[in-house]
Amino acid sequence: MTAQTVVTEFIEKLTSIESELQLLKDDRKELLEEYKDRINTKALLAAIRIAKIRAKLGDDVADCDSYLDEVDGRLD
């Protein structure tokens, strides 16, 4: 396989992946639009982010909650 063939193959695969990513971003946007009148999507997305962070913390969740109590209200 020539270098040119490899580069062409790579570019085609990368372009395909980027197209799929854009489609997923569009789907996400449509989903948020569909639910924005029924729930507070901004708050729900924040809750999902927090839940993911808490899941990663494992046993350190209590420490995080303690720190959060200290920082809460002090940041703009």
Image (cartoon, rainbow, N blue to C red):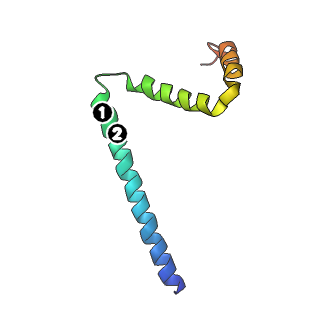
User: In the visual, does 48 lie left or right of 69?
Assistant: left
Q: Which mark is residue 29?
A: 2
Q: Nearer the viewer, residue 21 or 74?
A: 21
Residue depicted at x 46% and y 70%:
11
Q: Is residue 43 above or below residue 10?
A: above
Q: Are marks 1 and 2 in contact (CB under 8 Å)?
A: yes
Which image quarter: residue 43? top left
What residue is at 69 percent from the left and 13 percent from the top? Answer: 70
Rendered position, 45 above or below 69:
below
| Mark seen at residue 12 | none
Image coords of residue 42 (percent x, y): 42, 26
Residue at x-position 61% and y-position 12%: 73
Q: Nearer the viewer, residue 74 or 41?
A: 41
Q: Nearer the viewer, residue 4 or 1?
A: 1
Give the x, y percent position of residue 51.
54, 28
The disc placed on residue 33 is: 1
- The image position of residue 75, as x and y in percent, is 63, 18
The answer for how far apart the CA atoms under marks 1 and 2 are is 6 Å
Query: Would you place residue 71 above or below residue 20 in this image?
Result: above
Amino acid type, mark 1: Glu
Residue at the extreme bottom of the image, as rendered: 2
User: The C terminus lies in which quarter of the figure?
Assistant: top right
Q: Under tag 1, what secondary structure? A: helix
